[in-house]
């Protein structure tokens, strides 16, 4: 099984401070020969990219997106403008690789970053594709991002129930991805930073094997991010591991400033 990485960071704010702890993993799964997922978990930016495409196209696409976003994280200051510039550069990187020019080549780009530029710190979730961001707050789990997928569009239009969607033949068809042809702007959702919050970012390799309730269960059972990530990965593999599996868990604590 893939190794879980774990980190922590203290962030001083105007009136208090944040104690952040996070863990991340990416695993090939049980049925795929290669891992086309890529993960970035470097404060203040946390990203899962799920590549798709023949041969190594998907691997190139996800790695290109994460590499360009890593450069943004290294600056220590992330904004939506910086994200979009990085993704535009990633598109050019992908297009420059002959192995990744197939129309089916692309990657999801999903995650969040901590924004401390305003009067109050906030999370900004971003999404292209069907990887997901979940928020566990006050014992309830909520999917923050909206899937860019055919199935989600059918659900939104009332033509498909969530239960029917679980085994729909178009379950893997996404309607937005970062690929070699054009830049794509993510959807954004801004969230308050609340003491006790836990965030999960994952590729659909996890959500194919675990329900939202299952994710909530493992978070409740494992307060530490690394243990939660490992438990969810174990369960996803045990349930079939049909796709590459990538998971990031971030814990938030707000404590009085020094």
Image (tube, rainbow, N blue to C red):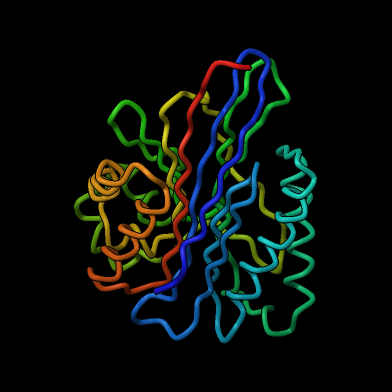
Please determine whether, in this image, residue 131 is positioned above or below residue 253.
below
Q: Is residue 61 left or right of residue 21?
A: right
**Foreground of the two, 177 or 11:** 11
Which residue is pictured at 44% across the width and 86% down the height? Answer: 33
Q: Is residue 63 left or right of residue 160?
A: right
**Foreground of the two, 164 or 225:** 225
Which residue is pictured at 33% across the width and 57% down the height? Answer: 207
**Foreground of the two, 256 or 139:** 256
Q: Position of residue 26 (x, y in %)?
A: 48, 66
Please determine whether, in this image, residue 227 is positioned above or below residue 81.
below
Please determine whether, in this image, residue 100 is positioned above or below residue 74.
below
Which residue is pictured at 62% across the width and 35% down the height? Answer: 114
Q: Is residue 170 left or right of residue 253?
A: left
Q: Position of residue 181 (x, y in %)?
A: 71, 66
**Foreground of the two, 225 or 162:** 225
- Corner quadrant of residue 1: bottom left
Q: Is residue 88 left or right of residue 236?
A: right
- Corner quadrant of residue 258: top right
The number of callouts visible is 0
């Amino acid at each position: 099984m893939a190794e879980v990485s774990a980190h922590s960071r203290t962030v001083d704010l105007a009136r208090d401070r944040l104690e952040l702890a996070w863990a991340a993993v990416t695993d090939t799964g049980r049925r795929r020969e290669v891992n086309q997922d890529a993960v970035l978990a470097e404060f203040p930016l946390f990203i899962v990219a799920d590549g798709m495409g023949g041969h190594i196209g998907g691997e190139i696409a996800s790695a290109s997106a994460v590499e360009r976003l890593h450069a943004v994280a290294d600056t220590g200051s992330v904004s939506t403008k910086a994200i979009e510039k990085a993704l535009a550069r990633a598109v050019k990187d992908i297009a420059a690789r002959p192995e990744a020019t197939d129309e089916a080549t692309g990657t999801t780009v999903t995650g969040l970053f901590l924004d401390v530029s305003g009067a109050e710190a906030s999370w900004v979730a971003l999404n292209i594709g069907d990887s997901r961001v979940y928020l566990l707050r006050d014992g309830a789990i909520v999917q923050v991002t909206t899937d860019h997928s055919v199935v989600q569009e059918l659900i939104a239009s009332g033509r498909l129930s969530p239960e029917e969607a679980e085994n729909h033949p178009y379950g893997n068809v996404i309607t937005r991805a970062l690929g070699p042809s054009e830049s794509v702007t993510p959807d954004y959702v801004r969230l308050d930073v609340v003491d006790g919050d836990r965030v999960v970012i994952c590729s659909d390799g996890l959500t194919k094997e675990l329900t939202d309730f299952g994710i909530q269960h493992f978070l409740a059972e494992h307060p530490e991010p690394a243990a939660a990530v490992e438990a969810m990965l174990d369960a996803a593999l045990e349930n079939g591991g049909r796709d590459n599996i990538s998971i990031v868990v971030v814990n938030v604590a707000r404590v009085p400033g020094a």
